[in-house]
Amino acid sequence: MSDRKTERLINLTLALLSAKRYLKKNQILENVYGYEGTQEAKERMFERDKDDLRSLGIEIEVGDLDIFFEDEPGYRIPQKSYELTVPNLTPRELAIISIAANLWNDSAFAPNAQSGIRKLQSLGVPASLDLDFKLKYRFENPSILLDGITKAIGNRCAISFSYDSQSLKERRVNPYRILFWNDFWYLIGFDLDRDEIRLFKLSRIVSEITAAKKKNSFEIPKDFNPRQYLPQSDHEIGHIAKVAIDKDTALILRNRGKLIEEGQQSDTFEFVYTNESSFIRELIWHGSTVKVLEPKSLSQALVALLSKVSK
């Protein structure tokens, strides 16, 4: 958004907010600084500005100037709808609001989420709308991938994605089935590079799903039994870690772990991880709010990586 448009939107907001009665369109175009050009151009500009303000969560009320006469409708912003009463939010509640806004940012709720965060920020409340965080969580939240994979299964088209593993990173797969097993989502499909049916954990897919244009390129075998490819328990394909997490921090990390002990300053959680480097990167993102208690090898690897980065 250009500086001129931003200034015009601010001017329009202040004019409609301070108006004690409805303002006609012509009054707005003549008195609000920033509307230039022909009458038609200014009217188009005004219509776009109204849409922009509404997308930011600002309510623009439309009403008649005189209830006894049919006249051109006027506009104003009700002060009560613009104000936001904020209770005494705890750090945990503020974190939840920030997380929710980030998760909604790509959805139909995006304008409402952004509006709520902006109103909080305008009151000095430390809520955030962090793009880097949103993108990171997007790829660590398996549910984001389900739609693309499900469509590919229905269309019988191959998919490709980046996978967090120690060997082959880029995978090309004919997707057969998606299953939720032992608290995790899995994709079972025919790996075109390894030439065999393989199991993929969705939380280790670190890119968007790219579907091939060609449909009906494969058939799922009639004797395909997905359960024979699933692990009996998640412990059989992973490692156990105990991590201390400071109070009221790292909510996403907490939600995917198992609470085993509560403390005054921090709580201890148990995690199952399958790839050490991936889990270390996740821990590093949370900074000093987390501390690895077990295993010792994971703690040493984390310290070694931090030392390497700091040099």
Image (cartoon, rainbow, N blue to C red):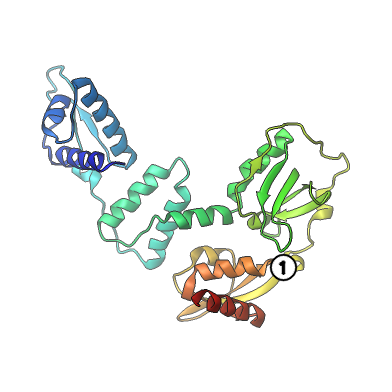
x and y percent of residue 101 in the render?
Answer: 42, 52
Picture coordinates of residue 65, whole percent (x, y): 13, 25
Q: Classify 10 Å Cα crowding around label 1: few (below 14), some (14-19), many (20 and above).
A: some
Query: Considering only vertical position in the picture, is 284 above or below 10?
Result: below
Residue 6 visible in rendering? yes
Q: Which residue is mark 1?
A: 238
Q: Residue furthest front?
A: 311
In the picture, measured across the screen, residue 237 lies left or right of residue 283, that is right
Residue that appears at 53% across and 76% down:
306
Numbered disc 1: secondary structure: loop
Q: Residue furthest top?
A: 70
Q: Is residue 177 visible?
A: no
| Image height of 10 relative to 85, above or below | above
Q: Quadrant of the N terminus?
A: top left
> Looking at the picture, which amino acid does disc 1 mark?
Gly
Of the pair 310 and 203, the residue shown nearer to us: 310
Which residue is found at the position 50% from the left and 81% from the top?
263
Q: Position of residue 180 (x, y in %)?
A: 69, 52
Among the 4 quarters of the image, the one containing residue 4: top left
Residue at 22% x, 20% y: name it.
Answer: 40
Give the image quarter of residue 53.
Answer: top left
Residue lying at the far right in this picture: please name it: 223
